[in-house]
Amino acid sequence: METLYTHPLYEFQHLQAENVLKLDWETKTATMTDQEFMDALSNFAGYAFECGAPGLLLDVRDFRYLLSEQLNAWRDTHIVSRYMKAGCKKMAYLTSTATLARIEKKEVAMDGFTYAYFDTEEEAIAWLIS
């Protein structure tokens, strides 16, 4: 594992053996701004190009920021397309067991990109590299 970038709100890591790019959010995200969120995802998409990792792992267990519908739409429009241009095919969200129990669909495919939700990093990575 190589740490690529560290910020008080998040960290990017490249899991080289699996060729997975990981975004690990910190609890300090409770006070994050929209611009900080957009900067984080823009930077993460840049690292997706650099690493050429087909799988992305987002650890949201400590993510505390409440996203607006506008910010979700911005991410879907501006960031997911960059992930796809970088060659990413799958994104795994690592979440708590309690949150996972409330998620209706554990895997969603749309526009050539697949999202899935897991409560263990091992399961998430296994899915990403399958």
Image: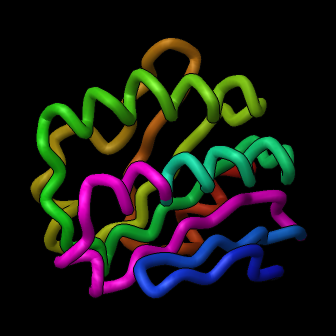
Residue in the foreground of this view, choosing between 51 and 112: 51
Whether residue 115 sits left or right of residue 63 in the image: it is: right
Residue in the foreground of this view, choosing between 112 and 43: 43
Residue 38: x, y in percent?
Answer: 41, 49
Which stretch appears magenta? 17-39
Residue 130 in sight:
no
Residue 107: x, y in percent?
Answer: 38, 37
In the image, residue 77 sits, relative to residue 119, either above or below, namely above
Whether residue 76 sits left or right of residue 49 in the image: it is: left
Q: How many marks?
A: 0
Identify the residue at the far top of this view.
111
Whether residue 31 sits left or right of residue 85 in the image: it is: left
Residue 67 in sight:
yes
The part of the image, by quadrant, that contains residue 30 is bottom left
Whether residue 18 sits left or right of residue 32 in the image: it is: right
Residue 11: x, y in percent?
Answer: 57, 78
Taking the spot 77% from the left edge, 69% from the top edge, the residue there is 14
Taking the spot 44% from the left edge, 70% from the top edge, the residue there is 59
- Residue 28 magenta: yes
Q: Where the C terminus falls, by quadrant?
A: top right
Residue 46: x, y in percent?
Answer: 71, 47
